[in-house]
Image: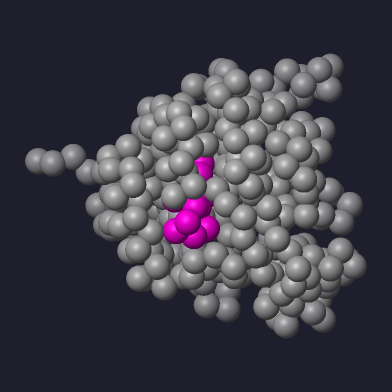
């Protein structure tokens, strides 16, 4: 009998897109982020993609000190792969965005593979009357956001990863980002296996139609053959349906309140764990097995949890 395929579930508990006023369930404080990440891991998330927020107003931050407030709890309570963002938020410089991954040397870090217009302003119509903080209004209403990821920026982050033994979740928001990745592969800055996170439904990137997913898959197959592992990130209402479709085509999946606040139509997800549990039920119903953290490490050729540098957190605790 043929073996069932192992599917890696990534959970992104908080992110930088949504704001606290958009959902009372969005983790903001370090304790909330730690609790959300641990619960997601307990439900089957092998990889935890982590951002930090200012606990006073929920504003995204890349201050490494803020990460020290939840990374030790997550590492102590789970064996999940720690994946630290280098995306941060579009308004940050690449130097700011790199700081946490450079400091903690995680097994895995996200890396955005190209510059895009980043349109959050359509969400303002839904939430305008609910916003508590002025930064939320500025964040959502801005029609001039350019999420900068130049070749120079990408190369700087890749070289940091090579130095620290950190591999990457390559976030590709459009087809051109796959070609950007191919350039760096040909330049020798990236070695297989590549972990490609196809991002669908962000305004400014590729859409969330099923044909968009198929086009990304075909292009990645042509460029990378068997040298990559694919994962699906569907934003908003696209989350579950594209993850399910992608899984049937060989993909891993990503869920979490960073990507979607919803569990179903009109139903806010109260926890990240609910989203993990839902997609796990779908995957197991399709006869896929859920990869454990150690299986994910083996699949993605990661360096191991013992090589993540949490010494800064330990010094702070002492």
Q: Nearer the viewer, residue 110 or 45?
A: 110
Q: Residue at x 49, y 60 (%)?
A: 174
Q: Residue at x 72, y 55 (%)?
A: 90
Query: Is 56 covered by the magenta stretch?
Result: no
- Horizontally, residue 316 falls left or right of residue 214, namely right
Q: Which of 69 and 152 is in front in this view?
A: 152
Give the vertical position of 250 relative to 97 (above or below): below
Give the vertical position of 174 relative to 251 (above or below): below
Which quadrant does the N terminus fall into? top left
Residue 302 placed where, x, y %?
Answer: 46, 26
Give the vertical position of 185 relative to 260 (above or below): above
Q: Can residue 25 be seen in this view?
A: no
Q: Nearer the viewer, residue 16 or 291?
A: 16
Q: In which quarter of the image is residue 121?
A: bottom right
Number of numbered callouts drawn: 0
Which quadrant does the C terminus fall into? top right
Judged from this view, the residue extending furthest toward the left is 1
Query: Is 170 covered by the magenta stretch?
Result: yes
- Horizontally, residue 169 falls left or right of residue 67, namely left
Q: Can residue 34 be seen in this view?
A: yes
Q: Quadrant of residue 52?
A: top right
Q: Give the range drawn in magenta.
A: 169-178
Residue 198 placed where, x, y %?
Answer: 46, 55
Q: In which quarter of the image is residue 111?
A: top right
Residue 141 placed where, x, y %?
Answer: 78, 73
Residue 267 placed where, x, y %?
Answer: 58, 74
Q: Residue at x 70, y 36 (%)?
A: 98
Q: Which residue is drawn at 82% across and 54% down?
A: 59
* Colouring used for the render: one colour
């Amino acid at each position: 009998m043929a073996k069932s395929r192992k599917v890696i579930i990534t959970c992104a508990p908080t992110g930088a897109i949504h704001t606290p006023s958009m959902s009372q369930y969005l983790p903001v404080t370090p304790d909330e982020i730690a609790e959300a990440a641990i619960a997601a891991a307990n439900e089957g998330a092998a990889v935890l993609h982590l951002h930090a927020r200012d606990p006073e107003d929920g504003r995204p931050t890349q201050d490494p000190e803020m990460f020290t407030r939840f990374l030790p709890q997550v590492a102590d309570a789970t064996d999940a792969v720690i994946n630290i963002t280098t995306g941060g938020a579009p308004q940050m410089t690449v130097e700011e965005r790199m700081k946490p991954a450079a400091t903690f040397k995680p097994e895995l870090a996200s890396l955005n593979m190209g510059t895009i217009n980043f349109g959050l302003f359509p969400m303002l119509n839904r939430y305008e009357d609910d916003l508590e903080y002025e930064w939320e209004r500025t964040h959502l209403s801005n029609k001039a956001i350019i999420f900068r990821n130049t070749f120079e920026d990408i190369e700087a982050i890749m070289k940091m990863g090579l130095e620290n033994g950190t591999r990457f979740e390559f976030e590709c928001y459009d087809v051109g980002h796959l070609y950007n990745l191919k350039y760096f592969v040909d330049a020798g800055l990236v070695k297989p296996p590549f972990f490609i996170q196809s991002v669908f439904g962000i305004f400014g990137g590729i859409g969330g139609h099923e044909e968009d997913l198929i086009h990304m898959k075909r292009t990645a197959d042509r460029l990378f053959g068997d040298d990559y592992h694919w994962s699906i990130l569907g934003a908003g209402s696209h989350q579950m349906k594209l993850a399910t479709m992608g899984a049937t085509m060989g993909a891993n999946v990503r869920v979490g309140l960073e990507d979607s606040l919803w569990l179903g139509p009109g139903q806010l997800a109260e926890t990240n764990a609910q989203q993990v549990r839902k997609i796990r039920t779908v995957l197991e119903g399709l006869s896929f097995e859920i990869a454990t953290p150690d299986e994910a490490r083996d699949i993605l050729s990661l360096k191991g949890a013992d090589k993540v540098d949490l010494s800064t957190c330990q010094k702070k605790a002492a």
